[in-house]
Image: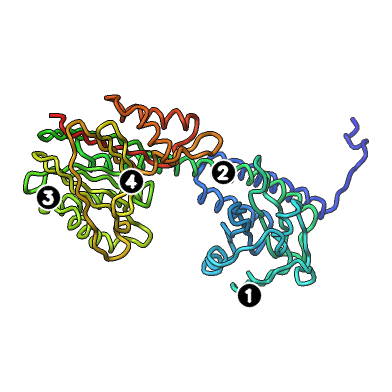
Amino acid sequence: MKGMTDGPTITVSEEFLKGMERKVEDLKTLMEVSAIISSTLDFNELITLVMEKAKNIMEAEGCSILLYNAETNKLEFEVAICGEESTCDILKKTVTLDIGEGIAGWVAENMQPLIICDVKQDPRFCGDADSQTGFQTRSMIAVPLIGRSGLIGVAEVLNPKKKECFFEYDSEIFQALCRQVSIAIENSLFHRESIQRERHKQEMDLASVLQRSFLPESPVMQKDDLHVSAVNISAAKVGGDLYDFVVTADDKAGVLIGDVSGKGISGALYMAKVISDFRNIALVSSSPPKVLGRLNSVLSSSPRGMFLTAIYMVVDTVTGAFTISAAGHPPFIWITGGEVKVMSVQSGPPLGIIPTDYPATTISLERGDRLFLLTDGVFDAKNSDGRRLEFDNIVKFITRHKNESRLKDMLVEYVGDFSAGMERADDLTIVELVWGAG
């Protein structure tokens, strides 16, 4: 029986075998990276693990990812693995590149990978990172990270440990890795943004509950012949408008309307402070100028840029005498004897800006008279053409419907119809006072 040696004998070099072994190992590593990507959506954990694998598979001294910040049009170091942790921190905290600047900037701008054997000979090389960290870049591969929505960033590997320069095969492996990295970054960023949106929603929900808790329990107050009602609609879950009703120490009714400069959570926190301080002051004083003056002093310690426009009225509910002080707030509207008046009373500046005294204006209402206090969200509402509703049109609407008992609700509907289909840009608050309603 003949031995099975009749076929051709194939011999391969040891170098070829080593190359094949490396390719098998590289394939295993790419599969491991794929498993890592499937195992977590945590951005920081994912990127660090993947880039550690990249550094190992490329047998490199360092690697990094620069993410593209669309707002600044810059590349920012997100991950840097280069031996010394302090070196990596410097990169992440201090080094950014414009699109087109340096090798990474060129790759981002042109959406093409680069292999550079000697960066010192390449005019595109920017040595800022090296000069700030002390790391010496000799050779590198830079690959654009591209997702469904466009540029994500640039990935780099630096300085092969066992040779002078990276080869074309190295670039192919790194590009294959970066395609997976791009998908992983896009997915993890979406996941992170989803978590942040949910956390923000929860914070806004909580702030909204807290804010509402500072407004009067009921939007209606009846005291003797004075009837007061209010409507408050926030532009978002948390707004900057406020109103309040109090009964002063000498049994008069105090009515406040205001608009804080901030919106969102900052506006809600400032509003809570305003209402808390206002109540403490108004309960011991029935003088609107003194109340606003004291509140102005308290608010002067608030963060720069935060202030409050307001109108505060104190009503003798027996005689119908109204004492009014204003702090930079829009005029109120008075319906009396079949006439509609726009009341631009003497005013001081918004509260919380400068020390000042606030003037007082006194008016007396006849039975059946009505006052409407507004915030600027009422007449600053915009339609789909970008046109503002404007204060004059509010006055005209009130004039046309001055005898309607549900005028306040009709006014809210009018603003809503005007701005139908548009996201509300500002809060809307209306307070109506009716004298002789008892």
Examine the rendering and report whether any part of residue 59 can be seen.
no
Vertical position of residue 60 compared to residue 226: above or below: below
Question: Residue 401 vs residue 100: left or right?
Answer: left
Nearest the viewer among 234 and 121 is: 234
Assign a secondary structure to mark 4.
loop
Cα separation between marks 3 and 4? 25 Å
Q: Earlier in the sequence, mark 2 or mark 4?
A: 2
Q: Earlier in the sequence, mark 3 or mark 4?
A: 3
In the picture of the structure, the residue carrying the numbered disc 2 is 36
Please tell me in which quadrant of the rendered image residue 303 appears.
Answer: bottom left
Nearest the viewer among 355 and 17 is: 355
Assign a secondary structure to mark 3.
loop
Examine the rendering and report whether any part of residue 258 can be seen.
yes
In the picture of the structure, the residue carrying the numbered disc 1 is 131
Identified at 76% across, 72% down, the residue is 120
The disc label shown at residue 315, or none: none
Identified at 33% across, 42% down, the residue is 342
Contact between marks 3 and 4 (CB within 8 A): the answer is: no
Cα separation between marks 3 and 1? 65 Å
Question: Residue 11 vs residue 120: left or right?
Answer: right
